[in-house]
Amino acid sequence: MKFLLDLVAGIGAAVLGFVALIGELAMFALSGLSHIFRPPYYPRLFARSLMEIGFYSLPVVALTALFTGMVLALQSYTGFSRFNAESAIASVVVLSVTRELGPVLAGLMVSGRAGAAMAAELGTMRVTDQIDALSTLSTEPMKYLVAPRLLAGVIALPLLVVIADILGVMGGYIVATWKLGFNPSTYLVNSFTNLKVEDVSSGLIKAAVFGFVIALMGCFHGYRSKGGAEGVGAATTSAVVTASILILALDYALTQVLFIK
Amino acid sequence: MTPKIRVRGLRKAFGAKTVLDGVDLDVMPGTGLVVIGGSGTGKSVLIKSILGLVTPDAGVIEIDGEDVLKVPRPRARALRSQIGMLFQNGALFDSLPVWENVAFGLLAERRIKRAAARAKAIEVLAQVGLAGNVADLRPSELSGGMQKRVALARAIAPEPAIMFFDEPTTGLDPIMGAVIDELIVDCVKRLGSTSIAITHDMASAQRIGDTAAMLYQGRVCWTGPASGLLAASDPVVRQFTHGLAQGPIQMALRR
């Protein structure tokens, strides 16, 4: 009997803790968003965040997109050739990259690079009293630390995804024309014949949402970290893991909303 | 005369652990109070409550006669903006150069131009005995004593009416500790500020405080002149200031 009571109490405590965490996260997100629109603004910090999230993530996102496009063309060829459907490869590559792989892979890469860095930086600031110091110097930490990063995440990721889309399609083109013997102009015509504006725009909408999620998770876990180096490490891990899971879950939800009429 | 800072019945618990259990304090304008007490007795929680970094469970915290826990938030923020804080570990912003650390409050508050803020920062650095050539260094490039001076420069740059010092000499050698104390006394006197310092260092407490208060079991158990700390007859104060193994504090730990 005692075992059952302990079990129920444990489950109850976990559920309550989870609900409290969701509430805390929602309040944090709303507070961060509201500070984006209220002065004072910190354009230098926004520019710095844009560089850290966007520019410095460019190499890893570019390489990921390029090789993904190449692999996609190769895999599609080996599969589609069984059904004599090789001509669909160009469309498959361009639609897969713009709709799904560009935003999702860019999101996961940026989460591992910039999201982790954000959590580590804010976490270190928390455990060394730097966030408290901001408050004592007439500066609202949410406005100074969180709002510029959220905004930068929303803007940087779609820009990265535009580049990832181009490089992903280019990767498919390189493999299709150099390795698989496709005619270059025919491949390009096939690529863009079936591509619609919505395919690209839906990917960019996803990217903006993923950018927000990455910045939110990085800031949230870093901001509330405690317990010294161990706490900062845990915050960094949590930021990457939660952002990655949310990216994959939101990808499904957004696909449902954007494509299923 | 209205105290610059008045605390009544301040209570704060973290879960089952009661840290502050009805703290009463008065700090008169232009005077320096030193709060002493063992580790975990709530000294930091006390000043963080006054600063608004910790929300107390109950009590009154008045600055210039206004209860910062009751007045509207913008007014509370304005009252607290008079406070400059020197953190125990400096809490310097490691992503910014020294001059931006020092001028941070000025840039945040008064919106002065960056060039003017840099010049002001170098002027304040000189007041704490640092040459202008440290202005462009990062905090990580400075020694512990220099970091403490930069942190002090950052706290005094906005010329606050109230200053808090959280264990200002911790981690410094005795000579550097004395130098920092001297700078603190000099800055506080020059600005005419009211100050609260928390420390374990008895020599430092006597140098920077006019009055002293001892926190024990969540309350102020003794107040008196800082210069009389070592001569106090109160058994708790006597045990703490003389670092005696036997006494009421040890008994409380054993219980």
Image (cartoon, coloured by chain):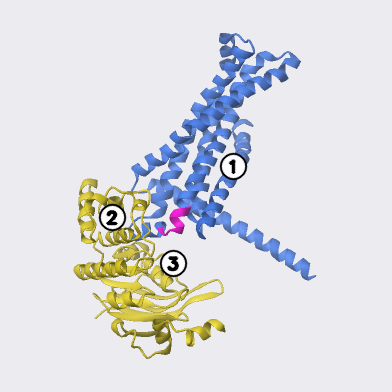
Chain colours: A blue, B yellow
Residue on which disc 3 sits: B54
| Amino acid tagged 1 | Ser
Q: Chain of mark 1?
A: A
| Amino acid tagged 3 | Val
A22 vs B186, nearest the viewer: B186
B156 vs A165, nearest the viewer: B156
Quadrant where the N terminus of chain B is found in the figure: bottom left
- Residue at point 30% right, 68% down? B175
Dot placed on the residue nearer the N-terminal end, 2 or 3: 3
* Structural crowding at the residue carrying mark 3, measured as other residues with C-alpha within 10 Å and reported as few (<14), some (14–19) or many (≥20): some
Nearest to viewer (mark 2 / mark 1)? 2
Indicate yes or no whether the magenta region holds residue A93.
no
Residue on which disc 1 sits: A244
The prevailing secondary structure element of the residues shown in magenta is helix
Relative side of A103 to B65, left or right: right
| Amino acid tagged 2 | Val
Q: Position of residue A135 (x, y in %)?
A: 37, 59
Indicate yes or no whether the magenta region holds residue A125.
yes
Q: Are marks 2 and 1 on the same chain?
A: no
> Bounds of the magenta span?
A123-129
Residue on which disc 2 sits: B102
Q: Position of residue A191 (x, y in %)?
A: 58, 16
Q: Are the two marked residues, 2 and 3, in contact with CB atoms closer than 8 angstroms?
A: no
Q: What's the CA distance linking mark 1 and mark 3? A: 33 Å
Identify the secondary structure beneath mark 1. helix
